[in-house]
Image (spheres, coloured by chain):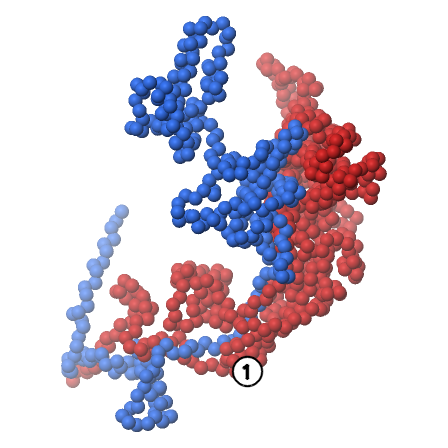
Amino acid sequence: MTVSYTFWNRLEPSPRTASPDPRGVSRALAAEVHDPRWFLTRQWQLGELRGEDAASPAWIELTTHAAIDATWRASNEPVDDTSLLTASGPQLPAMPLERALLEEPEDGDDLSLSVELAQTFEALLRERSRDASDDAFVRWLRTRFPLRVPEGDDEAARFARVCAGRSWDGVRLALLATMDDPWRALEILPTDAQRAALGAFVDHVRAVYGVLASAPPRAWRSDRLAYEATVGLVAPRTEAARLRVHPGSDGTVDWYSADATRAEGFGVTRTRTFAPANVRFRGMPNARFWDFESSRSDLGDLTVDLRDLGRLAVMDFAIVHGNDWFMVPLPMHVGTACRVASLRVHNVFGDVVEVCRADAYSPGWSMFSTSAAGGGFTDFFHLPATSSFTAQPGPVREEVRFLCDEGANLAWAVEETVSDAIGVPRSARERADVRRRAHDAAALAPAPRDDGAPPVAQYTLQTDVPAYWYPLVPERASDGAVMLREGVFVTSAQTATPAEGRLLGEGRPLVLRSDAVPDGGVRVVRRRMASRWIDGSLHVWTQRVALPGASDGSSGLRYDALSWRVER
Amino acid sequence: MDAALFDLPEALPRALDLSDDALRARADAVAATLLRRQCRAAWPPDNPGAPSTLAPPDDLMQTAAGAAQQRIATAPDAVAEALFGRKRLVLPELDALRVRSDTERDEAALRRPVNVHATPEAVRRWLHAMWRVRAPLERWRKVSLYAGALSVATHTEVTQLEPSPHGRWAALSLTIAEGALVMPPSGCVTLCRMSTGPLAEQRWCGLLLDEWTEVIPNDRELTGVAFHYDDPGAEAPQVVLVAVPPVAGQRWTREVLFDVLDDTFERAQVRAGDASLLGPLSRVLPALCLGANSANQTASTLFTGLQADPAPPRTEGST
């Protein structure tokens, strides 16, 4: 007897796998419905009908402690327990934090500024009086504060020649006007209009230029080529925290630019209630299946590699865990810090659930918390009074490149751009070329002769380097650290050239920590910044920014070199 | 002399010993050049409406002058190039405030410049601060300093285009009203006109030196606290179940109601069933199962012949 077996052929569409249908699984995902129960089917499949031992949050009770940025000190200034609270200086929310911490006093060594201030004073005087004695006063000012005319025939000299005799040095009047009794120093008896004009002049200078002085910024550490300052937060009469601020490479101070060196109790407590809202992003899938969704984000088009943890986290959040994340709004004044003391969720069943900080369970992870100087995180968030989103930078006024020269076993400070006598940025290379040509012309150097004479060997003890390259010689400090000290480099053409800019010109000789000049070098620029502030006021200041350098360089410096040249 | 202003240096003879005939010939040549330029300024080369050049010169010049005057509004650069014989920098009238169509008339009411009565001291402070930052304004600073040194007065006037009435220069510090800072309307445009001469009231033209956008930051920012909370994932059913008692006239009981609900959900779940989910029942559910027997001892439905012929295998070519 033949053994047979019976089987069944079951016919069913099964589009979950590859099929002849060119649309693939699209039909299955199209969520076709043929009667109302199909709606329930999809909800059942996706767990929307599953009961859980949970309740939706109804309202949130948020208790916060706050502290306010009060004042600041440079990191190299002595700070004791109370000095931050009593330190003199501008109140921080009154101006952008960048201006308060990073501002460099305006250099008065600028001919165009001298003329500008002189004309400003004359205009202020004209607006107050038309008396003939005022004209005589202005003529007297021209003789009392004459404009110095620099030598040469560059643009600054031409400007000075036009203005000399027609204008005067307003910077000197501005410096004198800040004295207790400027009229005594001027040795004249002013009229009421002149007195009023000088008062308005002082206000104008203070509002537009701040302090006229040739001093580095208080918080600038020339040995590190970086700013370091300490900001004190009070709440309200005791010091709540102390932050060590280090601006970013773009020169802005944002929430991540500070490390807490001290965190005490925040005094101001406030409890508020909010209705929670789901954390969502634009185009995020809805938790509910039967819902119209935005097509802004095509998550199906995402190509995610298993190593791409960022995208994986976003996908995971958007598809799986998104509906379990909530947020409550927390308005904060700029220039304050906020610590969340407690966050309690009141759900629809009347239960209260206390939500702890995320880093309470995993101390190595936190978001938007201020870092602690000793490692880890603090439990507060600092919203600095920053102008990072509103500031507009001006042109670079000065640039110095610090670089390592492995060939010469030296580091160099190279003045790339300096401001001339009327404040116009000029290439240091061009200025050095002009000086060198003038030097050659003065020395009446004969031109090389090319009469077919055979070249002769020439021994060179040391090759020349450009005059705007300043050597930094490594040396070991008493504490064992390697420092770079500015040396004197004498070329064959001239003696050591004084630096033209402020970055290298102040506090010479320059001494740097070796780690301030990393591989690839660093560029330090001075530029003006302008920003409106929260009260609508306009702030303009000059600050320094340390930027990563492009590469190491070579000065071409060689010793004991033998070369061939044509005899002159 | 007037002809020399149009880049015609030959209109001013350098030699003083030219004869009258030579001077007359040169004057005729200059006049012909001017007429030719004026015709080019009045009518483009391909314009068929240009009159014949055989017309009397005086009539032709008068006609051309009128046509050129009309063409200035639409093509000032071309007219200037034709009149001067080469390209010249032309400053057209600033038409930012001009109403181009009737539909813009309502909007133009808001775009009318408002004199914000900025004091000279406020303007000076603002200008002296901004030209330290804005490179294009630095050039105006230099011009102003030279002008001041040479006793040439410069004038600065501030007007403002306001999307909504404000009346206060947006560059000034904010005022406080009812305990809150009064912000200028978003989109406020300040026009700062600078000149070495008195400024015209209505029509003006000039060089655009610089433009930029300023943002006044908020004194309060909206931050947020995010937290994780296990929210139940249940959602309301997408359908409304309209149930009737299974037996007409029967009253609802709890058991009957539960049965109706259970039955509804069971039937909904059946719609998701396929072979892998049905397990042993896959042979009987759903009903579209067709029996077959390997020895043809029962009624069978065979699909062997229904399968489409597979595509012929590709021949591997040798290269």
- Near-viewer residue (B281 or B238): B238
What residue is shown at x 56% (from left), y 69% (from top)?
A: A328
| Relative height, residue A45 to residue A498 (above, below) | below
> Which of the 4 image quarters holds residue A285?
bottom left
- The image position of residue A321, as x and y in percent, is 48, 70
- The image position of residue A342, as x and y in percent, is 63, 73
Q: Is residue B128 visible?
A: yes
| Relative height, residue A115 to residue B180 (above, below) | above
Where is the N terminus of chain A found, in terms of image quarters?
A: bottom left
- The letter of the red chain is A
Q: Is residue A347 left or right of residue A168?
A: left
| Relative height, residue B230 to residue B28 (above, below) | below
- The image position of residue A260, as x and y in percent, is 69, 61
Q: Is residue A152 left or right of residue A290?
A: right
- The image position of residue A338, as x and y in percent, is 65, 65
- The letter of the blue chain is B
